[in-house]
Image (cartoon, rainbow, N blue to C red):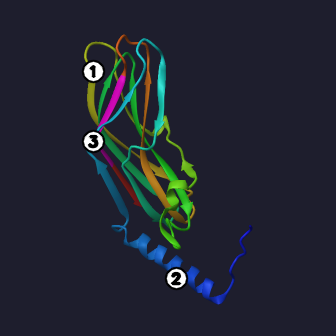
Amino acid sequence: MAQTVDNSLEQRIADLESAVRALTAGAALAGTAVGASAAGAVTLTGIASTLGSVPWDVGQGPSVDLYVQGGRLKVDMAASFEVYGNKTSLYVGYQILGGIPRAVDPSNPGVDLLAAAPVVRAPDYEKAASLQDDGVGMNQLGAFGTFDLVTGLAVGWYRVRLAYALAYGGTSGAPYGIATYRRLTVTRY
């Protein structure tokens, strides 16, 4: 059954109040920057003696939610890396969901609307921090960070979350990449 739009004065007032709450909440999110971190490990493992990859994993976090008015975000990300395997590369990038007017359903506050929001920016290998094992000797260790400036966003709520991927060449042991001490900061402009 199709739903009809409620254009009553009461509904319009409720919609305006909801918009003001969203703007107020957006302004109250730690000024202009929001950050999150996760010390635990994300491990991606490939298949021994093959060429291949593990596609972007966007479910391991951390993530932040924020209201964007100015259309621009600076995304800063960092992690400690461990990589093993001939020409194995671990990537840490980000994904952005959103551009929606509300982060939660006002009639059902337990419903996270950002979880089902469209992908605005997919993870990108060229904008990710990465470490590659040269395949000579022991595993490679490092800690890296990078940033990206995202423009052209519509006014609305967004979720930015870290993403992880692995690419590898043939190696006798199972190639792997581990990201720990993962950090994300998103700044609104």
Q: Can you give x and y, in whole percent of width and height, for residue 3 in the image?
A: 71, 71
Give above or below for 21 relative to 35: below
**Helix or strand or loop: what does disc 3 sit on?**
loop
| Alpha carbon separation for disc pair 2 and 1 | 55 Å
- Tell me whether the residue at label 3 lies in contact with that at label 2, contact meaning CB atoms closer than 8 angstroms: no
Q: Residue at x 41, y 51 (%)?
A: 75
Label 3 sits on residue: 40
The disc, 3 or 1, on the residue closer to the chain's N-terminal end is 3
- Of the 4 image quadrants, the one containing the C terminus is bottom left
Residue drawn at 52 percent across, 82 percent down = 17
Write down the residue under mark 2: 17
Predominant SS of the magenta segment: strand
Q: Secondary structure at mark 2?
A: helix
Q: Which mark is residue 139?
A: 1
Amino acid tagged 3: Gly
Magenta residues span: 176-183
CA–CA distance between discs 3 and 1? 19 Å
Question: Which residue appears farthest toward the front when viewing the image?
Answer: 1
Q: Is residue 133 shown to the viewer in this render?
A: yes
